[in-house]
Image (spheres, rainbow, N blue to C red):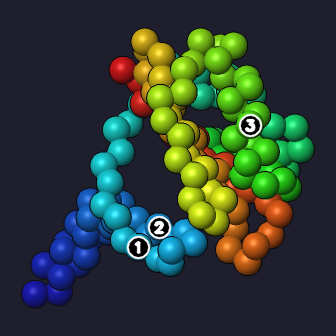
Amino acid sequence: MKRKLVIMVAFIATFVLPLVALRVDCAGPRFTVAVTVLPSAKADAELARIALPAGVHVETQSRGERGALLQQAPAVAAAHFQHTLPDAGWRLDRETRSECGSVEQVWAREDGRILIRMQAPLGGMEATRIRMQAVSG
């Protein structure tokens, strides 16, 4: 019985929990279910080539994702990407802005798409968490 319980917990931790994400914004916490498509090495390379706004303090990169912390508002980061990405051949497919200032942009070109989320940390700080995800196509 103990072995079955361990196997079940391992299965849930490996396959179920990564699909459930807690999303917090100005409307309060919500649960969403998402599927992440692992990008190719080419998509990772494209993501690494995207210039981040000046003043980024923390930068992380893992397979298919890149993150940063900027000590400015999300609108400043969004304007940076609107100015720099078209020069690299990307076109803005969609941009959504929330009442609390968070911005989400979807950029596309023939060989893939990039999702950029810019969100102010809770507490009204003048800072932005930037999270980019690339999907090759």
Amino acid marked by disc 2: Arg
Residue at the far bottom in the pictured view: 1
Task: Look at the picture and state if 96 lies above or below 91.
Answer: below
Q: Tags 3 and 2 in contact by the CB under 8 Å rule? A: no
The disc at residue 48 is: none
Using the rendered image of the protein, determine whether residue 63 is visible from the camera's viewpoint. Answer: no
Q: Tags 2 and 1 in contact by the CB under 8 Å rule? A: yes
Horizontal side, residue 72 vs residue 9: left or right: right
Horizontal side, residue 99 vs residue 41: left or right: right
Residue at point 89%, 44% (across, down): 55
Using the rendered image of the protein, determine whether residue 112 is visible from the camera's viewpoint. Answer: yes
Query: Pointer 2: what residue?
Result: 23
Secondary structure under the numbered disc 3 in the rendered image: helix
Q: CA distance from mark 2 to mark 1?
A: 5 Å
Residue at point 17%, 86% (across, down): 2
Nearest the eye: 110 or 102: 102
Return the x and y of residue 66 as percentages of the image width and height: 62, 41
Image quadrant in which you'd find residue 22: bottom left
The disc at residue 30 is: 1
* Label 1 Cα neighbours within 10 Å, binned few <14 / some 14-19 / many ≥20: few
Image quadrant in which you'd find residue 34: bottom left
Image quadrant in which you'd find residue 82: top right
Return the x and y of residue 118 as percentages of the image width and height: 64, 51
* Label 3 Cα neighbours within 10 Å, binned few <14 / some 14-19 / many ≥20: few
- Whichever of callouts 3 and 2 sits on the residue coming sooner in the sequence is 2
Return the x and y of residue 86 as percentages of the image width and height: 64, 18
Secondary structure under the numbered disc 2 in the rendered image: strand
For the N terminus, the quadrant is bottom left
Amino acid marked by disc 3: Ala
For the C terminus, the quadrant is top left
